[in-house]
Amino acid sequence: MLEQAAQAAVTGLKEAGIDFVSGLPDGWQRDLHELVEADPAFTYVPVCNEGVGFSVCAGAWLGGRKTALVMENSGLRVASEYIARIGLGTGVPVTMILSYRGDVGETEHWGIPHGIVVEPLLDALRVPYLVVREIERLRPAVKRAHRISEAQLHPAAVLVSGDCVWED
Amino acid sequence: MAVERFELLELLAEHVPDDALVMATYIGAVSFEWGCITEEHPRSAHLGQMGDVIGLAVGLALALPHRRVICLDGDGSVLMELGQLIVLGQERPPNLTTVVVDNRCYESIGWSAHGRRPTATAGRADLTALATAAGVPYARTVESMGELNRELTAAFDEGGCRFLDVKTNPGASRVPPRQTDGIEDKYRFVRYVERLEGKPVVLFAQQDRQLQHESSLR
């Protein structure tokens, strides 16, 4: 993620009222993790498994915090077990910011399956999402995803790609 | 050596401070008996399932660092997602006591003429060693009621991030199943947290709140 995009995402998180972030860094969102970790406005909990990160966020929400999970879209597959159990089964909101690896423009062969799976999987999990490919759309998208997440008490997602990660 | 699960839960209930919160599994005998022993007190969230109870408890403990949190989990659940031990060992919430009811089998799936299906703790897996290796500062295996009483007394007198792997005998629930689902359990718990902490968890009706605010300014 370009520095300007990472800054926009942080602003969106703050304006949404999110104060607790977990996640597993990836190549695109490494800078976002670093910004969040360094910012005292957030409690940052790094995890080595996105499913655990989802559980940690859900627990923090039950304690009154507003949470986000930042991860590569491959992490959605790992977290899907807990999104189904905790999200669909209990109804807990978590705003998820996912790198859209495998989107048009991808350079890495290993990212292709991530792109093939992510949107059908979000649909299967009944997670509403926005695909953001312009930096100026990222801040409001994070806020909007958080709003519907809180309104439906179920996760919502932002998929980040395009101009947010590439300068062509 | 091992203890009876119901007696373990009765003793734990005696030790849990009134203002503490409990993140418990809602699967099987542990949940049924804990709900019965604690008379379904709303301080207990029966929201954890297989592989997420410790993760939920870590999040809750970090969210409310001033409040004692107890995690009540089973061996099958811990084994399903060992990554939870990593985040427990990394974050080390000093207000979190984890109690694993380790009966070394998958009790809730029932059993056949061949007996109960064993978990890996019936074999070579050692949850206390795993927790220690993950960085949990205090992890102990407990095999008697005397040990359990000492460990729980220390946990609630001294605090700290503690992990207790309590070996229990297998056995069906002594009480009937609980009669709520995850949705009802969630609302019961968060409304209790809201009263306890004096702040909202669920934030419905934002538009209506804004309209109310604007009308009050006119």
Image (cartoon, helix red, strand yellow):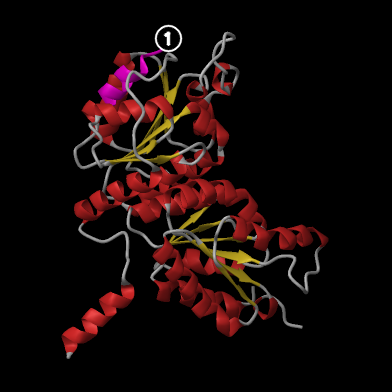
Residue A105: percent from left, percent from top: 78, 74
Position above or below: B83 against B123: below
Q: In this view, does B49 lie to the left or right of B122?
A: left
Residue drawn where x is 28% and y is 47% of the image: B188
Position above or below: B37 against B20: above
Residue A116: percent from left, percent from top: 74, 61
Q: Is residue B52 magenta?
A: no
Residue B2: percent from left, percent from top: 41, 12
Position above or below: B49 against A40: above
Residues rendered magenta in the picture: B1-12
Kindly identify which residue carries mark 1.
B1
A62 or B135, which lies in front? A62
| Residue A48 visible in the displayed image | no
Q: Is residue B4 magenta?
A: yes
Q: Look at the image and tell me in which quarter the N terminus of chain B lies.
A: top left
**Residue sitting at the far bottom:** B218
